[in-house]
Image: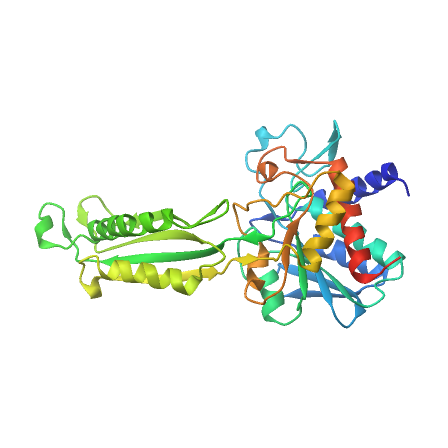
Amino acid sequence: MNEAELGQELVAILGELIAIPSPFPPSDTRAICAYAAERLGRAGYRVETLTRTAGIDNVVAEIGGGQPCLVFNAHVDTVGVGEPAMWRTDPFKAVVRNGLVHGLGAGNCKGSMAVQLWLAEEIARRGGPAGGRIVFTFVGDEENLGPDGMYFLRESGKVKPDMLVLGAQTENHLIAAERGVLWVRIEARGRAAHAGNPAAGDNALERLLRLIGHLQRELVPRLAQRADGPMRSTWNLGRLQGGHNTNVVPNAAWAEIDRRLLPGETVDQAFAEMAGILARAGEPEESFTLIRLRGTNGFRSHEEGPLVRAFAEEIGQRLGVPTRFLNATGVSDGRYFADDGIPILNFGPGSGAEGHAANESVPVRELVDAALIQLGVVRRLFGIR
């Protein structure tokens, strides 16, 4: 198969994926996972479809046996269409224009899924790995940052990688380090009263604002001193709510905060730091609570390790330029494996600027390059023909 034919095959697979709706909400991934499971079963993989919450299916397919175990992953869910009038083409039909494949999820993350499906079938056509095990996982619940996809596969023990490669829009370069994320809620309590006599009450919303102000004054200067290359330690006040009517002194209010952590910081440390700052805010101890909603640590893969080195060499040979190591703005499903001591990479076709936007697209050229780079990596690590 020449490269033009490979491009046609990848576009055909991607077109079939785009035509299967899998947006969040509602997070129904049954149809697209059935498609992947059928293809992989036909190729000779041992395939399981695993579900914790009805409607959110996940596919695990493996070939070979023993160690090491290399796991490929792509999430099958997309964001919603958004405003249909913003689309110049049918979001659920792949349209190729000027070397770009347009459609919902073309970049995030059905482009990577199409490449990985082709890769899985190509590995099987070549007889599988000479030693070790290769696993392909196609999961839901990623766009929801929820627990029913890759988190479920790890916690259930169905996926135990020695190396993990996640499909992502990296323009076929690498994300080898990723920040951790912590979400917390501050709940403030007070006493309701009529707004005509506010002194009779205790305004929970005002207390919450004082707590947030104190946290900002104390925490932001500390975070400004924390950097790891292009990565920064950050916080963001994302939600604020209090009261139920303008003429009532609110007796309850809450806020939610997003903390992004450098790979050297931990979720436990970040939560303890915020709790300590709030404890010194001067508010009565019983008048507020800091709640940990969710959190995962960051990770860093050693650039001289076998997985990163194999990718870097294949990228250099294929693209003719040194590998770029990108700074991730968001978080991937790799975060669930951050404490497992394994190399984790994000890699795939497409630009991050295209994701979650109307008219998203992925270059056909990058689909072909992604397929051949990853085939080269598997050849280096597992000795396939």
Q: Is residue 187 visible?
A: yes
How many marks overall?
0
Front one among 63 and 306: 306
- Expressed as whole percent of the image width and height from the top left, the position of residue 299 reads 55, 58
- Expressed as whole percent of the image width and height from the top left, the position of residue 372 reads 80, 46
- Is residue 94 left or right of 4 when viewed as pictured? left
The residue shown at (83%, 42%) is: 9
Quarter-of-image position of residue 121: bottom right
Residue 185 vertical position relative to residue 357 in the rendered view, above or below: below
Front one among 2 and 150: 2
Q: Is residue 31 visible?
A: no
Front one among 92 and 312: 312
Front one among 344 and 205: 344
The residue shown at (68%, 66%) is: 162
Q: Quadrant of the N terminus?
A: top right
- Is residue 233 left or right of 178 when viewed as pictured? left
